Amino acid sequence: MKEKKQNKHLYWNPYFGGFLLGILIIFTFYVTGRGLGASGAMKSSVVTLVDAAAHEHAESHSYYSKFVQDDESPMNTWLVFETLGVLIGAFISGALSGRIGWRVQHSPKITRRRRLIFAFSGGILFGIGAQIARGCTSGAALSGMAVLSTGGFITMLAIFGTAYLFAYFFRKNWI
Amino acid sequence: MGPLIPNELISFEWSSIIAIIIGIFFGFILEASGFSSSRKLAGVFYGYDFAVLKVFFTAAIVSLIGLLYMDYLGYMDMSSLYVHPTYLWGAIIGGAIMGIGFVAGGFCPGTSLSAVAIGKIDAIVNVIGIMVGVFIFSELYPLFEPIYNGYFEGNITLVDSLGVNQYWFVFILTVVAIVMFAATDMIRKRVKKVFY
């Protein structure tokens, strides 16, 4: 009870959220034959920006060129539309619960600046890792596990295992 | 029989609209489960909040059981679904880098997007970081290429690589998850509470 009084926001029961997410994954596979994703749209954005800034470079480059086509924008992919939906859906949920607002969320023990530096560098690592593993927690781990993909299970174990191993070094940021 | 779009039961033109609708539900579930809060997410690594673990494994098991049932009842051909390919060392090293990024930044790409939508500035910075990370990887691609393309084992499943029966595997995984959920509740009672 004490916790309810002090935690600012109340969220769904995690089993309820997980159940609905599972149903959504089944539906997604049933309709599209593939799973969910998140980092793919960020890759498309980077490819688009590089293509706009230096078209020659993108076309001749061994990695960007996989995603650049002459007649189509790299943003015209399934995952980009799905990501637009994620932004809309999260905004609706936040609006219904009064959670919208500009703020930096961090532990009172660290400064705003420190939080932003770690958020940025954590993002860089996640971006590199998600390319190497060809997907992030959604696309590789969760959607992979739903179809028993060996790679999906390995990626999931590697993400959580390493995060637990390194949690000690980042504890000041969180507890 | 599903999947509907690959089997052309729904025309391909609908796929963008369906993508947005699926995304809306995905974003809503993430935000309503509290995944727009990095401090809630990070709780799983310090034992003060196990929502990530519970949502993640409940979703994985519900979808596994549901897909197997749909395959068994003939609504869908499971073998025609896209199976995430296995590049052994890419999965391990990529996953390990993501793990450090997760505990450092407090977000993964999907949760970060749901936090951007409600105005979290740390999430916006995190998404910019992810894009910088993708850019770094792309520019240094020749360096990463051996691990990105190497150790390819195909689009294999655990049935292929462990030789297990899929129904038994899912059953055992479910039991393991339930035991894990009970254990995390006990751990959480012993850990000092963190309020956010």
Image (tube, rainbow, N blue to C red):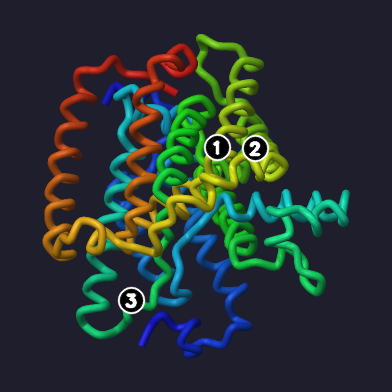
Label 3 Cα crowd, 10 Å radius (few <14 / some 14-19 / many 20+): few
- The residue under label 3 is B79
Image coordinates of residue A154 in percent, x first then y, are: 34, 46
Q: Secondary structure at mark 1?
A: helix
- Image quadrant in which you'd find residue B196: top left
Residue B58 placement (x, y as % from top left): 27, 51
Res. B156 image quadrant: bottom left
Image mark for residue A126: 1
Residue at (55, 11) in percent of width and height:
A110
Q: Is residue A24 visible?
A: no
Subunit under mark 3: B
Residue B18 numbered tag:
none
Q: Residues within 10 Å of mark 1 (few under 14, many from 20)?
A: many
Q: Amino acid under label 1?
A: Phe
Judge whether B42 appears above or below A157 on screen.
Answer: above
Q: Which amino acid, mark 3?
A: Ser
Badge number at residue B133: 2
What is the spatial separation of the Cα atoms under label 1 and label 2, in whole angstroms?
Answer: 7 Å
Marks 1 and 3: CB-CB under 8 Å? Answer: no
